[in-house]
Amino acid sequence: MEIIIQPDSETATAVATRIVTRLLREKPNAVLGLATGSTTLLLYGALTRTKLDWSKVTTFNLDEYVGLPPAHEQSYHNFMWENLFRHVNIRKKNVHIPDGVSRDIPKFCAGYEAQVRAAGGIDLQVLGIGTDGHIGFNEPTSSLTSRTRIKTLTRQTHKDNARFFGSTDKVPHHVITMGLGTIMEARQCLLLAFGAKKARAVAAAVEGPLASLNPASILQMHPNVRVCLDHAAAAKLKRADYYRRVFTNKPEWQRI
Ligand code: F6R
């Protein structure tokens, strides 16, 4: 894991933006795995301001709320189109987001996995992290080899996401999410986390034991993960000085 600590969320996002833009310039037909949530807003904003060609890019979103149709204001379909897709020249047929109103969820999930495989797998998976350590919506005790499936949100996530819905009782209890096994097959992962509220989850993911209680800790087993943090999200890392030293002293050819 490469831990990149920047003074604030803007500079951390600038590093993440360089990682994504470099990939899309080197591989115009790249397959991106995408997350939603407040953490990704700066990244998607920055990407819409770059002159990238998205015409050959394929995307797969991590998750969607069960029961929310694409047109719902809080659906992740709406989030993605509002914050990224409608600002770039991506083709609608290349965009994949789990169907929250699917009538046969297990069949939909198996089909989603097949679509990822048919696209050649994910080149770069963008991730946020929940305060309870989830990635995608793989909540604590998710199987470390799980695939796309329905999950129930924890009380903590339900409460955290109430800020988008105005009140807790409007937040759906169920989601469709790619599994930890699905995420682990991406060739590269890029996790972003900002703010003091994420510090505990980040420390558990990066330096804690590998355990289903800390779902993001599975990333310790991935050969190519970058974690872009602001100071506050990095505050509980024991080895922060070392991560800063690594980043500052990178050989020229490794610079981002
Ligand atoms: C949503 C997703 C989640 C979020 C996480 C953090 O697609 O994958 O894992 O990344 O809940 O959400 P924010 O960024 O809103 O704190």
Image (tube, rainbow, N blue to C red):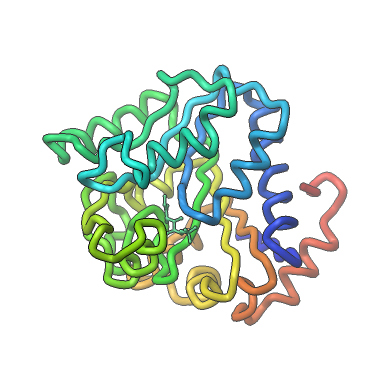
- Figure quadrant of residue 75: top left
Q: Residue furthest left?
A: 104
Question: Is 108 positioned to the left or the right of 26 in the image?
Answer: left
Q: Is residue 135 above or below residue 54?
A: below
For image coordinates 59% across by 26% down, the residue present is: 88
Q: Quadrant of ligand 1?
A: bottom left
For image coordinates 25% across by 58% down, the residue present is: 170
Question: Is 61 positioned to the left or the right of 189 in the image?
Answer: left
Q: Is residue 232 above or below residue 101?
A: below
Q: Quadrant of the N terminus?
A: bottom right
Q: Report how many numbered discs are placed on residues in the image.
A: 0
Question: Is 97 positioned to the left or the right of 125 in the image?
Answer: left
- Figure quadrant of residue 249: bottom right
Task: Give the camera-side residue of 240 and 160.
Answer: 160
How far across and how far down the image is residue 107, in percent? Answer: 16, 34
How far across and how far down the image is residue 181, in percent? Answer: 35, 50
For image coordinates 59% across by 70% down, the residue present is: 195
